[in-house]
Amino acid sequence: TSSAEVKENRNIGNLEDHPIASTDRARGGTTSSKRKRPLEEGNNGHFCKLQLIWKKVSWSVTPKNALVQLHELKPGLQYKMVSQTGPVHAPVFAVAVEVNGLTFEGTGPTKKKAKMRAAELALKSFVQFPNACQAHFAMGNCVSPSTDFTSDQADFPDTLFKEFEPSTHSEDFPVYSPVNNELLSTAYRRGRLLCHTLDLVGTAKPGRHRAAKAESEKNPVVLLNELRSGLRYVCLSETVEKQHIKSFVMAVRVDGRTFEGSGRSKKLAKGQAAQAALQALFNIRLPSHIPSRSKCHHLPQDFADSIYQMVAQKFQELTDNFTSMHARHKTLAGIVMTKGLDIRQAQVIVLSSGTKCINGEYINDQGLAVNDCHAEIVARRAFVHFLYSQLELHLSKRREDWERSIFVRLKEGGYRLRENVLFHLYVSTSPCGDARLHSPYEITTDLNSSKHIVRKYRGHLRTKIESGEGTIPVRCHNAAQTWDGVLLGEQLITMSCTDKIARWNILGLQGALLSSFIEPMYLHSIIVGSLYHTGHLSRVMSHRIEDVGQLPASYRRNQLLLSGVSQAGARQPGKSPGFSVNWVTGSAELEVLNASTGKRSCGGPSRLCKRVFFTRWARLHGKLSTRVPSHGEMPSVYSEAKLVAQTYQSVKQQLFKAFQKAGLGTWVKKPPEQDQFLLTV
């Protein structure tokens, strides 16, 4: 009998093959009852009262690879072939996969290995644990995690076994006692384990579900502390705004990186900082912090007001306290650079004004004219001017110069933005197009009850009116204009500022030329002075591009923080001026452009025109080609130079197709002849 007991305890699978019959238990003197009693006694006499479904689990000889692990955590992912480089006998494949809104690209000598590498990178971004099970426990998914039974570790974590047993207290299951962990350990060592789902007779109390829900909605500070204990939060600033409203900026350092958050209290600011760290390091967004279509991202009001005041003060300084004739404007824009959300280190880097576009008769085929002189667009071009200057600083031979640059060099080549450097765009009024069209009505009218005629074109792509103000929906189905048609009197079509900003949220601000050197550069926030409606602005800037599809590595669907200002500047009545001004940090004074011709008042080209940018790009290409031979021979035609950044061009086409698929219209391009000019050195 003793040998039978040992055999029975060692082979738990017999319970499945030979279930305990009620007749055997009734005959207390039979051999079968004697053989079963030691198990009953070893479990406090209650083991047989649990109705368990036992299931044999065959063990794999090798652990699950990254592809399988990622599929279990994120089923339904699509892997996309990005490129194939290298010689025929030694090809290098690049495969990308999008997880949690981020794209991870892996390379390898075969497609399979590249795919595996992409999965590994994706896993590392949000699984910072020996196996997937522990990651789920840390995120609070304690109810039904995708347990990794193929881990090659010596033992499972103790918390894992809590899935397979009721609470040690009998309040949820008053009849039954917990399963003996030793049996589970024995089953594990013998290569057999309980079925993932245990059929326990009895119904758990609703309090258990409430506790599980509360567990999954942890405070960001609490969850971050579980992942990285012993963190210390530091208050960077404490300011008092009007009406004695306080604002705090808190910072925390995690894994060598600093994350900041702001709020009306230190607690809220800490939560913002912790959430930023969770998202950046672990790709974790807590359920209560995940934005929905009805919600939008808000920038702290005091921070937004500070950005507005900095831009206004800088413009006042450049226009001699607004006494200059060029101080007159209908729309003012500026970009402010900050380190985190610390306003003390903020710097205005570009300024611009303007509301008009070039007349068709002045379109230039040598890249000497600026086509669009709306303030937001000129600010973006001034920002590109700033980026060229920063790259040139980084390539300087003087150490103090490249240490001041906002760029850092990547090991694999190219450059990216330094950690924690953010850019904020201020615009004195809603961008022209769909954002401005609907904002005045939505401020005073309920969205569901309004029947204004413009709702027919909600979210539709719109174009600016040549030599005037305002926009109209895109009507043509042809994506390109013709040079001779414009010269013969056809209106020159320019896409609205709203649509261009939406484009920046996918492609970045840097443009096609700089994309061959640097990673995409995105705005962190937009602050709007007037005609502002947060909900609609969020929809037209972000939600229209939600279905753009999977994006290559380093590109993303940028989620802007949005805000108005507490007290907007006085609206300037009268006709819009026919000029546009721009300023870039390091410049002594404003540059004034005639908006109708796209050139300076003296007739010379602007520092923001295509030819100037192409010249600066060519100089950078010459310097970088000596360091990175893969850059190849420099194109001499502007349109060909733009095609060097192949990924940028493919993402642009992907965006245009997404607009068309959503029924929002066709993106209209300028005549191709204007980009076919040669660079003369």
Image (cartoon, rainbow, N blue to C red):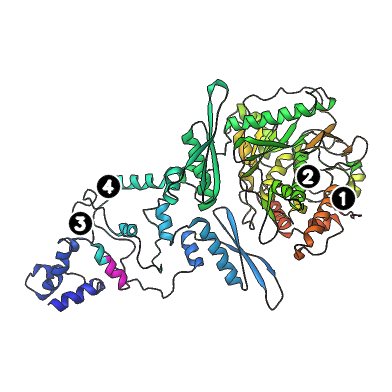
The residue singled out by tag 3 in the image is: 177
Question: Which badge, 2 or 1, is on the more N-terminal residue?
Answer: 2
| Residue 334 % position (x, y) | 72, 35
Residue 580 percent location from the top left of the image: 82, 34
Q: Earlier in the sequence, mark 1 or mark 4?
A: 4
The reply to whether dot 2 and dot 1 touch (C-beta < 8 Å) is no
Q: Residues within 10 Å of mark 3 (few under 14, many from 20)?
A: many
Residue 622's quadrant in the figure? Answer: bottom right
For marks 2 and 3 on the same chain, the one whose residue lies earlier in the sequence: 3
Q: Position of residue 460 (x, y in %)?
A: 69, 42
Residue 589 quadrant:
top right
The answer to whether 576 appears left or right of 273 in the picture is: right
Q: Which residue is mark 2?
A: 385
Magenta segment boundaries in residue numbering: 184-198
Residue that carries the numbered disc 1 in the rendered image: 674
Q: CA distance from mark 4 to mark 2?
A: 64 Å
- In the displayed structure, 190 sits above or below 337; it is below
Local secondary structure at mark 3:
loop
On whether residue 188 falls in the magenta region, the answer is yes
* Closer to the camera in the image, 486 or 37: 37
